[in-house]
Each structure stands twice: as structure tokens, then as C-alpha cells.
Amino acid sequence: MTNLYFVRHGKTEWNLEARYQGAHGDSPLLDQSYDEIKQLGRFLAGTQFAHVYASPIKRARLTAFELVKSIQQAVPLTLMSQLSEFGLGKMEGMLFDDVKQQFPSEYDAFRHHPEAYDPTSIDGESFPQLINRMGRAIKEIAAVNQGDDINVLIVSHGAALNAVINALLGVPLAHLRDRGGLSNTSTTILQTQLGREFKLIKWNDTSYLKKTISDPTDTI
């Protein structure tokens, strides 16, 4: 069995501002995020990882680099563009409230009704497109990391991870959000045999963080 540890990147300035980042927007990690990544590293240090994969977008890339240092393991790290966040087109860089005013139907569907989300007018990426490109990458990762109790770390983004993890578990588009969101520096674990079937072991674990997840900007 292969155990896939999915980590959402540390909290950024735009996360704090409730601003969409997407695949082409980005902002620096908060100072506190480096401490939280170290807390996660200490939590994971007792687990031996065969490989680390990460989105190349800076906020995820830095999270992965810092995490590898914190777990103190000589583990290879590979950047994969397929693990990038949703392409959000015209919404990228905008405050959530401004998107709600300017693109109300896209805002509502993206957050609450994935099956109805049509990003054509904003030049964005659809849920099926995201699930296809990211799902294929995860299945490839599982296929090349086979063995008895192999652990792999994947560092990516909240909206993308939420969509693809639920899709891998067989959740229909209309219910992708039913399980709730993913918090910054959270860990979600799936178990798979050759990337064919996936079983949820743990969802959105933040028990190792020395804070209470109460700020709505912590979770997406």
C-alpha cells in the first residue's frame, strides 16, 4: 500500500486578506507560517518518506522545502506543474468580496456548486479540467511509489487538493464541498494500491498546530 500525505501550503498574505491566488497569482508566506511548517515537520518526522512532490508555485514550493528541512530526512523532492492550483483567470488577485460583486455566478458556483461552475467568461479552469490533470499526476505518483507501507508527501493548494482528493474518493462533482475545506498547513492522508482505488485515512488534520483554527481565512 502507498500512503499519500497531502499538505496544503502555509498561510500567505493573500490568504489573510481573503484574496484569490490561483495558478498565476502568489504572495509571501506569513512569518507565522514558517513556525507552523516546523510544527508539521516535527509531527511528520517519525514517518519515513520515499519522495516529496510539490507544486512549483512559490508558496507551495517554499512550504515543501521548509518541510523537508524540518523532517530531517534525505528525501528527494520533485516539482510538478500538474500539482498547481486552479487557474482562476480574472479572479486571481481579487478580494473574495470583489469577486462576489463582479462575478456573482462564478463566485457562488466555485464555492458551493462545483457541478455548475463555468469559468469560460473569466478565462479560468473548470473542475473536470483540474481533476483530470491533477488526478493523473497523483495516480502516476502512486504507480512509481509502490511497496509495503510506502509514504509519499505531496504539497499543493487548498482548492485544488479539495477537488482532486474528493474526486479520487469517488465523490460526485455536486458534493465535492460536502466534507468541508482544507486549512493551511493541514495534512490529509489517502491510502492506495497502485493508484487504482483510494481510501481516506485522515481529513484536514491540524492537531499538531499550536493554534485553534477559527479564522475563516485559514480554510478554503
Image (spheres, rainbow, N blue to C red):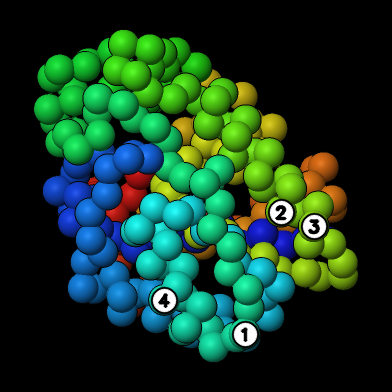
Give the mark, 3 or 1, whose residue is nearer the N terminus.
Answer: 1
Left or right: where 13 falls relative to 80: left
If you read the primary sequence from the N terminus, does the residue marked by circle 2 or circle 1 appear first? 1
| Residue 94 point in image, percent of width and height | 17, 34
Q: Tag 3's secondary structure?
A: helix
The crowd level at tag 2 (other Cα within 10 Å; few <14, some 14-19, many 20+) is many
Snapshot quadrant of residue 203: bottom right
Q: Amino acid at mark 4?
A: Glu
Residue 173 seen in the current view:
yes
The image's mark for residue 144 is: 3
Q: Is label 4 in contact with label 1 (beta carbons under 8 Å)?
A: no
Q: Marks 2 and 1, how far apart in space?
A: 19 Å
Q: Is residue 194 left or right of residue 52?
A: right
How far, Cα to Cα, is label 4 from label 2? 21 Å
Asked if the residue under mark 2 is in contact with the one under mark 3, i.e. CB atoms within 8 Å, the reply is yes
Residue at 81% over, 70% down: 149
Residue 141's label in the rendered image is: 2
Which quadrant is home to the N terminus? bottom right
* Horizontal relation, residue 156 to residue 76: left or right: left
- In the displayed structure, 195 sits above or below 45; it is above
Residue in the foreground of this view, choosing between 152 and 171: 152
Q: Residue at 31%, 75% (x, y): give it.
A: 34
> Answer yes or no: do the residues labelled 4 and 2 have beta carbons within 8 Å?
no
- Is 3 positioned to the left or the right of 203 in the image? right
Disc 3 to disc 4, C-alpha distance: 24 Å
How many angstroms separate mark 4 from mark 1 (CA)?
13 Å
In the picture shown, does residue 201 fall above or below 157?
Answer: below
Query: Badge 3: few (under 14), some or many (20 or more) residues near its Cα, within 10 Å?
Result: few
Q: Nearer the viewer, residue 30 or 83?
A: 83
Which residue matches tag 4?
A: 66
- Using the image, determine if residue 96 lies above or below residue 197: above
Q: Would you name the residue on which mark 1 appears?
A: 74
